[in-house]
Amino acid sequence: MDQMTELDPTPAANREAYAGGAAAKIGRWQVAEATAPVTQDIWPVLDYSRVPYRLYHDRTVYELEQKRVFGGPTWSMIGLAAEVPKIGDFRASYIGETPIVFNRDTDGSIKSFVNRCAHRGAKVRRELSGNANSHICIYHQWCFGPDGRLTGVPFRRGVEGQGGYNKDFNLADHGLQKVRIASIYGVLFGSLSDDAEPFEIYLGEELVGFLKRIFERPIRILGYHRQRVRGNWKEYAVNPRDNYHASLLHAFFSTFGLERASQVGGVTMDMRHRHCVTWGRTEDEAAQERAREAYARVSDHGLTLAEPSLVAFHPDSFDDLSVAIVSIFPNCIFQQIGNSVATRQIRPRGPDEFEIFQTVLGYADDSAEMTRHRLRQTNLIGPAGLVSMEDGEAVELAHRASKSTQQAAEVVELGGGGPISDRDYRVNDVSVRGFWSYYAEMLGIEPAGAVR
Amino acid sequence: MTTDLLDAYRLLAEYGLLADAGKYDEWLGLFDERCSYYVIPRENHELGLPAALIFCDTRAMLEDRIQALRVASKYNIHTDRHIIGMPRVATTGCDSLTVEAPFSVFQTEQEGDTRLFATGLYRDRIERRKGTLKITEKMVLLDTFAVPSLLATPL
C-alpha cells in the first residue's frame, strides 16, 4: 500500500478516496459515466490494479481497439508457414476483425493481403485454404496476384469501343491492402501498420527464446479447434496471464497433480511488460506431497485416472518445464501443457463475442506412438479440454454480470500492486497489469505517471 | 435386415435419452468393453487432420472423461436434448453393423433459453454381444465445429 500511495491517482475525484486508503474502498470506486468519452480518466488508479468493466462492453472502445490496437503498431499472429508449404498454397486468417489471406508466392516467399476487394469491398478469397496462382473476386472478377497486386479487370476497354474504364485507370492504384509479415521459426505474424517496431524488438529476447523452445524443431499440424465465447476478447487475453485461476478454476489440474499454484514456476515478461510467459516445472515427489497438503482444503477428491498416460509427460525440450504459456500482445497464445502443444489466436467478433482459434501441433519427427500420445493429450485443451473448458464458462459469467456495472472496476492485485515486474512464484497476476499498461498506451488512454 | 435397423435405432434412442438424463453409468453401459469415442471437427476431417475435440481410444479414457465431468469439470448449467435421425445401417459381418445417423443437440440454459448447440453425423461400429448391441466405436463428426461456449456433456 505504501508504494501505491506514492502514485498520483487519476481522475482527481478518485484521489480523495484513494487517500482514504482501504483496499475495499478502492474496489467500490466509480469510474467515468459509460457515455463519457474514453480518455485516460477512465483508469481509477495508475498501477492498473483496478480495471473498469466498461472496457469489456463499450462499442466505442471496441472500435478504437480495431483501429489502434489491431490496426495499430502491433503484431498479430496470423498462422504458420507449415500451413502453406507449396507455391500457391493460401490460408485465410484475421488481424482483429479484418479478414486477411497469406500465401506462398512463386519465389517461395510468403505474402499477405487484406481479403477485401479494392472494387466493392467484397471478400475475394472465399475458401479458408487451398492452392491457387491468382485470387479472383467472384463479384466482378477482378483478379489479384499472390502479392495482392491487381493484374486484370474484365471489360477494361469496354465492349466494341463502348463503356469500360477511362484510359487513366491504373491497375497499380487498386491492389489489395498489403499486410506486413514477420516470421520467426515458421510462426507468421502480420501487421496492418507501417509503424510497428521490427518484430524481434517487439517480441524481446526472452520471448524469442520461448518461441525457439517450441518451434525450432519442425512442426506438424494435427488440426484445429474453434470455440465461440459470449464475452469480450480481452477477458480471454488476460486469462492465461492470470496464474491465480489456473489451479482453482481448472480442478482437473490440481486433482491429478499436473499443475498447482504451489508448483515451482513464475512469470517472465518482455521489457515493456506487454507479453509474458507463465511457466511451471515438473516436481519431485517431496514437492508433490507438500502440494497435496497445500491443496487438501481446496480440493480433495483423491481422484485416480483409469488411463494415467493422459497426464504422462515426456519432455520435448532441453529443459523440464511441464507448462509454458506464452502470451503475445495483443491476441496470441502459444501453449505447452505436458506434451500438448498449440497456438491460440483470439479473434474478436464485436464487443460481446470472440473466437478462440487453436492450432494443435506435433513435431514432424514424432513417432506414430508419440503422435497418438499428443492426440490423447489434446483432451486437455480446447473447447472440450479437461483443463481449459472452464475458461469459456468463467469468461461468460464475468461478461454477463459485469455488464450492468460498467462504472465499477475489477481487482487485479495478486502479488501486490505497484510496479510491474517478473515473479519467480506462481501466485500472482502481475502480467495482467502489464497487458493493461500496454493496452492503455496503444489506445491512447495511458494516464500520466502510470506504471509501465 | 429390418431387425438390425430397428435394433440400431433403439440403441441410438437409448444413447440420446440416457445422455440427456445424465445417466452416464447406463450410457457407458451401451459401449463395449473395448471401445473408442471421438468427437472430430468436420474441418479437420475434411483436411485429413487427426486432431479431435475428445479423443478416447480406450474405454478407460472414456470412463475418465465421465469421472472428470462429475468431479472436476465446471461448465454452463444446462440440459441437453439429443434429436437423432433415422440411421442408415449396413451389416458388415454376422454380428457387426456400421451405422450412420444425423444428430443435433439443443442446449437449454437455466432461464429456459434454448439454442442449437451441435449438429453432425454419428458414424458408429456396433457389435451384437449375446443378443445385445454394443458400441465398439463412435465417431461424432461435428458440423458445428465452432463450438458454442464449451463442450462438456457428451454429444
Image (spheres, rainbow, N blue to C red):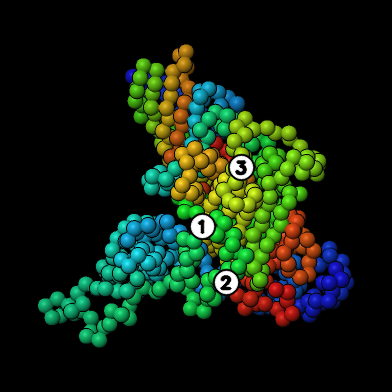
Q: Earlier in the sequence, mark 3 or mark 1?
A: 1
Residue that lies at the very extreme toward the left in this rendered image:
A160
Q: Which residue is mark 1?
A: A216
Q: Is residue B6 above or below residue A21?
A: above
Residue that lies at the very extreme toward the top in this rendered image:
B130
Amino acid at pointer 1: Glu
Looking at the rendered structure, the secondary structure element under dot 3 is loop
Q: Earlier in the sequence, mark 2 or mark 1?
A: 2
Give the spatial CA distance, label 3 vs label 1.
20 Å
Chain for disc number 2: A
Residue A151 visible? The answer is: yes
Same chain shared by disc 3 and disc 2: yes
Residue at x-position 55% and y-position 23%: B29
Chain for disc number 1: A
Q: Which residue is mark 3?
A: A313
Residue A74 in which image quadrant: bottom right
- The residue lying toward the viewer, choosing from B112 and A274, is A274
Residue at x-position 59% and y-position 62%: A209
Find residue A202 and name its label.
Answer: 2
Residue at x-position 76% and y-position 49%: A262
Horizontal side of residue A23 vs A373, given as left or right? right
